Image (cartoon, rainbow, N blue to C red):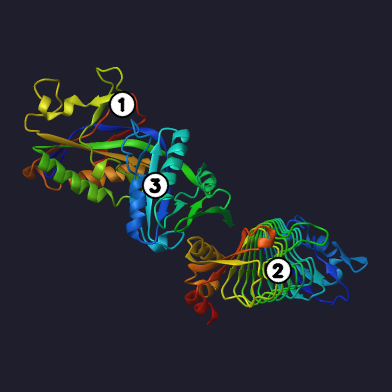
Amino acid sequence: MTALTLTLSAAPDFDLDLAGVSPDGLQGLKADRVRRHRVPYGRRVVALGDFFEIDGSPDSGEIEIRNATAKLTRVGAGLAGGTIIVKGSTGNACGSEMRGGALRIQGSAGDYLGAAMRGGLIEVSGSVGAFAGGGLPGTTLGMKNGTMLIGGDAGDRLGDRMRRGLVVVSGAAGAYAGCNMLAGTLVLLGATGAGLGSGMRRGSILLAREPEMLLPTFTSTGTFNLAILPVLTRHLVSLKRSLKAKLEGFTEARRVVGDAACGGMGELLIAAPAAARRTRK
Amino acid sequence: MKINGVFIEDTFAEAFPMKATRLIVTALNETWAGHAARAMTGFATSVIACGCEAGIERVLKPSETPDGRPGIAVLLFAMSTKELTKQLQNRVGQCVLTSPTSACFAGLDAGDPLPLGKTLRYFGDGHQIAKKFGKTRYWRVPVMDGEFLVQDVAYMSKAIGGGNFLILAENQAAALDSSERAIAAMSKVANVVMPFPGGVVRSGSKVGSKYKALPASTNHRYCPTLKGVVDSALSADVGAVLEIVIDGLDVESINEATRVGVRAACAPGRKKGVIAISAGNYGGNLGPFHFRLRDILR
C-alpha cells in the first residue's frame, strides 16, 4: 500500500488548516473521499482537492505532503499515530497537541511547533519559530511529553512552560529558552539568547557551549561526571544518528542550578570544555 | 555412559520455579563496578537463609552498557515476587547506591516491573530528578561523589533455580580441580549464575533434619566420612564430593551450563581422580524441572 501523497498544486493565499489530515483522521477513506475532505481555509472551508493533487491511501499509515509552504498550518496537530512527512516548510502550530506518531518536516516550521504535545516525535530539518514545545495561547502548560528534534535554529521562548519531554536544537536558540520550565529536558547545541531558563522551577537544559549570559539567579555547583549524559546521548543518537558527532564525549558537565527566584530546582548542564570543543567543530 | 573414564550416573537434577531479574551495574571502571556487583550478590548463596540467590553473570564491555561505562551483569533469583522486590531494594540500596561512581540499570527489557529507582529515589530527600527518555525513566539521586543514576524499574522473568550436578572424586584436591574447570567453562554461558562461593558448594543439603527447627541439613548419603555408618550413595573409592548449583532464566540455558560444566569437570578424567558425575534430586516429586544428565550430554 503506497503512502497518501498530497502535492500542493495551487498556492493558498490564506492559512490552510491541516489539523485533521492525518493517517488516523483519514483512515478508511478512499482517494475520492480524501479529495472532498473539508479543511478550514482562512474564514472559509474548502476541499483538500481544491489545493492538492492526491494519490495513494491513508491506510498505509503514512502521509506525504509535497511542495509545502508556510501557509499550511497545524500540520500533524493532534496526531495520534502514523507518520506525516512534509517536504517544504510549514506554518504555525504544526504538531501541536500531538499524542503519538511522527511528524517529519523537511524544511522549516512556524511558531508553536509541538505546542502542548503529549507524545510522539517531531523532527524538523530546518529552523522553527517561537514557542516551540511551549503552551498554546490560553493554556498553562507547554509540552507534556514526546520528543522534538530541530535541525536548525529555534525562535524565542523555546520550551516555554514545558512540563515533560525532550527537545533538541542543533542550531541557535532564541531568547528565553526554557522560560518558566516545570520539568523536561532541552538540549541546545548552538548559541543561546538572553534570559536562558528564566523562571524555571525544575527541568534540565543541556548546553554544548557556555551561554552568552547567565541570569544572576543561577549558581554554578561545579563540574561533574554524570552518568545521565551518556545515557541521553545514546538515546538521541538512536533517534538521529547525525547527532553522534555533536554529542560524542558529552560525559562531563558544569552544573548550574536555578532559577533561584522560583525554587532553584532547575539546572543548566554545560558541557565540559573538551566535549564542547568537539561540538563546535 | 562415560566421559574420559568418568562415569555419568543415570539420574537427574530436580529444579524449581523461581522469579528472577537481571541488573546492569556500571561504574567509572571495572574495578568499582566489580566491587558493587560483588557486594550486592554477596550472602546470596541459597534461599534457605539468604532471601535470594544471586551471582555475577558476566562482565560487560562499555559498548554493552546503557551509560557506556564498564559494567557487570548480575542475576537475582527469589521464590516470590515479594521477596525478589525486597531483596532488590535492599541490595541495590545498600550495596550499589553506596558504591562510588556506580549506576544501576535494568538488564531485562520486558516482564513484570519491579520497583528499583521508584523507591530508592527517596534517598534523594526531594532533590532527586526524574528523566524520561523514550519509554525509560531514570532517577538521578544526589550523593556525595556526584549522582547515583538508577532506572525506575527492573523487569522480572520466570526462572528456574536448583539445577545441579555433583562431582565425585577420589579426594578434595581432585574434586576441587574438576569443579574449578567446570565453573570456568560455565561462566561463559549466558542467563545462568552459580550462586555459591566460587560457584561450588561442599555442603549439599537434604530437606529437613532430625532437629525440628532446621529446614535443611547435611546430605549424609553424600558425606564420605559417613560411609559405612549411613545408607551412603558413595562407592568405597570416593573421598570427596562437590556440587555445582545452577540458577537460570530458562531450561535451555541450564541445559547448556550443565553440558559444558560436566564436560569440563570430566576433562581431567578418571586417571586424575574424578570418579563420577551425579545430580541431586528429591525423587522427582517436588520440582517440576528435571535435568537428566545423560539426555543433556548425549
Residue A158's disc number: 2
Farthest right residue in view: A43
Circle 1 or circle 3, nearest the eye:
3
Q: Which residue is at 23% across, 47% downward? A: B183
Q: CA distance from mark 3 to mark 2?
A: 41 Å
Residue on which disc 3 sits: B95
Q: Is residue A176 above or below residue B104?
A: below
Label 3 marks which chain's residue?
Answer: B
Apparent side of residue B91 relative to residue A179 in the rendered image (left or right): left
- Image location (x, y in percent) of residue A169: 63, 72
Q: Which residue is at 10% across, 28% downward? A: B225
Under mark 3, the amino acid is Cys
Q: Which SS class for mark 3?
A: helix
Residue B284's disc number: 1
Sort mark 2 into few (<14), some (14-19) or many (20+) by Cα contacts within 10 Å.
many
The reply to whether label 2 and label 1 mark residues of one chain is no
Q: CA distance from mark 1 to mark 3?
A: 37 Å
Apparent side of residue B10 relative to residue B43 in the rendered image (left or right): left
Name the residue nearer the viewer: A21 or B298: A21
Apparent side of residue A46 relative to residue B61 in the rendered image (left or right): right
